[in-house]
Image (cartoon, grey):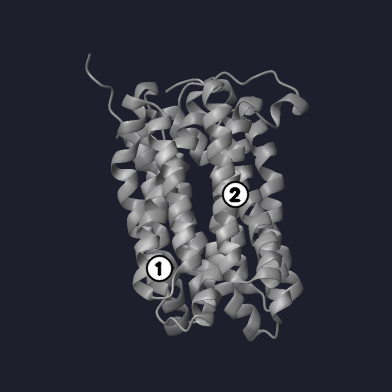
C-alpha cells in the first residue's frame, strides 16, 4: 500500500507558522528582561512580568482546546494569532512597566490559543499511520527557531533597539496569519460538548504527567545551568544550549519513523535513560567538555521522549477530541516549566546546584518507572 504524503501544501504552511511564532516568541524572551531593566525594573519585577505569560498561557489552553473541538479550527487559530500579533507589536509602543505586564498577560493568552491550535491542526493534516514521523518533522521548526532566534533577537536589539526587535517579532506573526488563511483545513463537524467535559482529555493525562516531568527538569537546566557553570568557573556555557539544540534537532529527523514502526517503548525508555544519564553527568561535571557531552545526550533523550509523548497523545484520541488532548498535553509542559523553575530554585538554595541536578534525575527515574510498570500497559500501542 502506497504511503500517504506528509508534506502537503497545508502541512508545510503549518510547519512554517510554527517556526515563525516560535521564532517571534524566542526573540522576545531574552530581550524583554533587558528592556525591563532599561526602564528601571528590578530582578523581581523582571521575574513577575516574565512569569505572568506562563500563567495566562496555562489558563487559556483548556479553553482553546474546548473551542477547537466545539467550533472548529480556523476561527480559533486566527483569533490566537491575532492576539499574539497584538501582543508582540504592543511591547514596542509602551515604556511603562505596568502596561508591559498587561501586554505580557495578553501575549500569554495568544500563545496558549495559537500554540494549541497549531499543534491540533498539524495532527489533523497528518496520515494516522505516519503521525510519529510527521510530528517529528513538525517539531523540527521548534528546534530550529530555538537555535537561531534568541541570538537573533539580542543582535537586532543591540544594533537597532528594542522597539525594532519587537516590531520584527510582530511581523513574523503577521506572516503566520497570512499563511493560516490559505491552509486547507480538514473537514470538521463541530462537537456538541459541554464546557466541563471539553476542557481536558482524560486519555491524555498519562503522557501529560510524563511530559510534565520532562519539562520540570529542563526548566532547571534553562534557569540554573549558567549559574552552576559560573560557580564552577566554567566559561562559554552558552555552547551547551547550542549543542543541545543541534542534538534535539537531529533526534527529530529519524525518531518519528521508529515510533510509527516499532511502538512507543523502544524510543521512550531509552529517551528517559538518556535524560537520567545526562542529568547525573551535569551534577558531577567539572569541565566544559563534560557539560557538552551531557548536552548531546540530554538533547537526544529530550527530543525522543517529548516527540514520542506527543505522538502518544494525538494517536490515542479521536479527531473530535484533538483540541482538548493537545491543550492537556501543552498544559503539562507549561506547568512543568513554571513549577520546575520555582521548586528547583528553592532546592538549589538548600542543597546547591550539583545536588539539585542529581535530584532532577530522580524525577525522570520516577517517570520511567511509572511508564514501565503502569502506563505502558494502559496506553494504546502505536
Q: Where's residue 363, x and y in %?
A: 59, 49
Give me the disc on residue 291.
Answer: 1
Asked if residue 331 lies left or right of residue 74, the reply is right
* Nearer to the camera, 366 or 7: 366
- Picture layout, residue 19 above or below residue 88: above
Q: Where's residue 264, x and y in %?
A: 42, 30
Q: Where's residue 134, x and y in %?
A: 36, 34
Q: Quadrant of the N terminus?
A: top left
Q: Residue at x 71, y 66 (%)?
A: 346
Q: Are marks 2 and 1 in contact (CB under 8 Å)?
A: no
Q: Residue at x 49, y 76 (%)?
A: 229
Q: Where's residue 191, x and y in %?
A: 64, 19
Q: Quadrant of residue 304?
A: top left
Q: Quadrant of the C terminus?
A: top left
Give me the disc on residue 363.
Answer: 2
Q: Determine whether the residue tagged by mark 2 lies in a helix, strand or loop.
A: helix
Amino acid at each position: 500500500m502506497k504511503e500517504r504524503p506528509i508534506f502537503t501544501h497545508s502541512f508545510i504552511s503549518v510547519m512554517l507558522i510554527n517556526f515563525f511564532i516560535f521564532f517571534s516568541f524566542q526573540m522576545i524572551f531574552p530581550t524583554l528582561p533587558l528592556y525591563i531593566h532599561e526602564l528601571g525594573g528590578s530582578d523581581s519585577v523582571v521575574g513577575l512580568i516574565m512569569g505572568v505569560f506562563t500563567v495566562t498561557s496555562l489558563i487559556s489552553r483548556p479553553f482553546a482546546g474546548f473551542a477547537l473541538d466545539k467550533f472548529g479550527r480556523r476561527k480559533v487559530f486566527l483569533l490566537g494569532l491575532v492576539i499574539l500579533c497584538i501582543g508582540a507589536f504592543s511591547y514596542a509602543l509602551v515604556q511603562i512597566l505596568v502596561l508591559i505586564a498587561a501586554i505580557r498577560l495578553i501575549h500569554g493568552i495568544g500563545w496558549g490559543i495559537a500554540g494549541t491550535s497549531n499543534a491540533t491542526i498539524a495532527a489533523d493534516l497528518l496520515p494516522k499511520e505516519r503521525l510519529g514521523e510527521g510530528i517529528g518533522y513538525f517539531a523540527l521548526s521548534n528546534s530550529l527557531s530555538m537555535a537561531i532566534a534568541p541570538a537573533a533577537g539580542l543582535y537586532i536589539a543591540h544594533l537597532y533597539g528594542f522597539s525594532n526587535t519587537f516590531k520584527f517579532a510582530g511581523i513574523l506573526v503577521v506572516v503566520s496569519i497570512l499563511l493560516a488563511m490559505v491552509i486547507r483545513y480538514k473537514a470538521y463537524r463541530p462537537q456538541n460538548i459541554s464546557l466541563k467535559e471539553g476542557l481536558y482529555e482524560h486519555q491524555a493525562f498519562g503522557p501529560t504527567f510524563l511530559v510534565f516531568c520532562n519539562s520540570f527538569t529542563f526548566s532547571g537546566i534553562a534557569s540554573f545551568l549558567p549559574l552552576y557553570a559560573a560557580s564552577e568557573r566554567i566559561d562559554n556555557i552558552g555552547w551547551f544550549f547550542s549543542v543541545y539544540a543541534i542534538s534535539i534537532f537531529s533526534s527529530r529527523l529519524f525518531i518519528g519513523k521508529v515510533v510509527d514502526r516499532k511502538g512507543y517503548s523502544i524510543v521512550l525508555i531509552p529517551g528517559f535513560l538518556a535524560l537520567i544519564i545526562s542529568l547525573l553527568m551535569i551534577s558531577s561535571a567539572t569541565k566544559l567538555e563534560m557539560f557538552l557531552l551531557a548536552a548531546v545526550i540530554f538533547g537526544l533523550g529530550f527530543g525522543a521522549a517529548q516527540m514520542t509523548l506527543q505522538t502518544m497523545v494525538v494517536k490515542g484520541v479521536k479527531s473530535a477530541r484533538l483540541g482538548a488532548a493537545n491543550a492537556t498535553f501543552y498544559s503539562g509542559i507549561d506547568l512543568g516549566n513554571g513549577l520546575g523553575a520555582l521548586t528547583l530554585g528553592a532546592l538549589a538554595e538548600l542543597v546547591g546546584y550539583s545536588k539539585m541536578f542529581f535530584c532532577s534525575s530522580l524525577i525522570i527515574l520516577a517517570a520511567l518507572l511509572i511508564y514501565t510498570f503502569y502506563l505502558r500497559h494502559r496506553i494504546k500501542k502505536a
